[in-house]
Amino acid sequence: MKKAAGTARNETPAPGESSSNVTFIPVAAPPVRRKRRSRLWFWLPVVGVLAGAAWYGWTVYSPAPATATLLTQPVTRGDIENAVTAVGMLEAVKSVDAGAQVSGQLKALHVAIGDRVERGDLIAEIDPATIENRMEINRAELAYLEAQLASKKAQLAFKQANLERQRNLVAGNTASKATLDQAEADLAAAAADVQAVEAQIRKQQATLAGDEVDLGYTKIYAPMAGTIADNPAKEGQTLNASQTAPTIVTIADLSTMTVRAEVSEADVGKLEVGMDAYFTLLGQPGKRFTGTLRQIQPLPTTENNVVLYNALFDVPNPDGELMMSMSAQVFFVEEAARDVLLVPTGAVQMTRGEGGKRQAEVTVVTATGKTETRSVEPGIRNRVSTEIVSGLEEGERVVVNAGSEGSGSSGRSDRSQRGMRMPPMF
């Protein structure tokens, strides 16, 4: 700069021009390029934010394209049934409570739960001491009455002889008529005394016979063949049979079980005595136990305002795998078919044809990939499958459900729900 200034000072003015004291100092040009670059770096984040906002708005609010899909399944061959379902419980086809008819201490119990007994087997014994003492007293009373009877009969014989004697005396005019009347009255009284004692003897004999029956009740025998299912009384326990007969053991015939199914009032009208039935157990869901409906009890039970009717059917239990109080899923078969063509129930559409007649239609996918609607004749139908009597061939594919995966409104709703989360309420 000094050199430039010196050069400026040594310059001489041109002819005709006046000299000036002004000194010109050259100044460097501003860095234009650096200012433009700093402004470019300032706008880049703004442009990025705007681009992100535009992309977010497009992805959230742009309509999603509708894509139609077809869910198809082939026509298969198999078995089908239409059944009324219910929940049931297993019971013994026959059971009896063997109880005590006399009071006393349970002296001995000869069986345990699970034992097999036959009719007439000794099950338990009650201490007979009280009854035996009562019987001894009644025997003594009977012996006393018999002695009284002998005395009264002797008196009767004496009165009878006295009457005969008085009659002879009256006939010979050696005794008065009053004496004869007294003899007759004494004879009648003696005969009445004999009858009274005889009645007391019969009463005492009946009492003694009742004691003998009670003594027999101290030994409890099995009234039927079966299995000991319950044993509420224990050995040594005192039993009071004055009001109710206490149960000692429960004997059940487990060779045949009864299923008591609770059927709702909406389905009980579909049941008929003699229809096939089966059930499955919770522990054996794949095994069926079959039987025949034998009874629908007319008196229902009500649980939580739901009216239920008891339907009973029996099943054999030769192996003893069925036990009392097991829960059963019961099926009463209304109709069934084997080895028939089946399609999903959702593939069959019921429409109104000519004259308002209902007809069934299915949508079939052809070999070229196109769909066609075909009329079919359905058979047995349940919630899962429908039997096709005619109109389809095995292996053809039918449309179960046709629709679009998302539309404009549903796409916006789903995306907006994914993009906007509700804040926690608490």
Image (cartoon, rainbow, N blue to C red):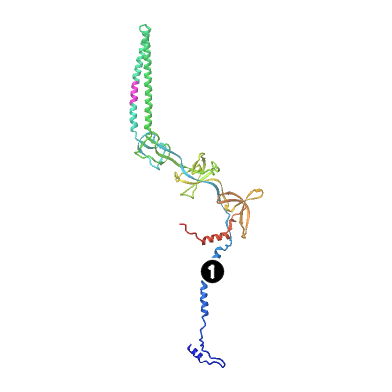
For the image, the number of numbered tags is 1
Q: Residue at x 53, y 61 (%)?
A: 416
- In this view, 128 is above or below 332: above
Question: Mark 1 Cα within 10 Å, few/some/many (few <14, many 20+)?
Answer: few
- In this view, 203 is above or below 290: above
Q: Which residues are magenta?
A: 140-148
Q: Residue at x 35, y 18 (%)?
A: 152
Q: Which residue is mark 1?
A: 50
* Residue furthest top as drawn: 173
* Residue furthest bottom as drawn: 15
Residue 64 falls in which quadrant of the image? bottom right
Residue 15 falls in which quadrant of the image? bottom right
Q: Is residue 344 visible?
A: no
184 or 136: nearer the eye? 184
Secondary structure mostly seen in magenta is helix
In reply to whether residue 141 is colored magenta, the answer given is yes
Q: Secondary structure at mark 1?
A: helix
In reply to whether residue 173 is colored magenta, the answer given is no
Q: Is residue 327 visible?
A: yes
Circle 1: residue type: Leu
- In this view, 139 is above or below 259: above
Residue 179: percent from left, percent from top: 36, 10
226 or 106: nearer the eye? 106
Residue 231: percent from left, percent from top: 39, 41
- Is 341 displayed left or right of 143 in the figure? right
Residue 391: percent from left, percent from top: 62, 52
The C terminus, quarter of image: bottom left
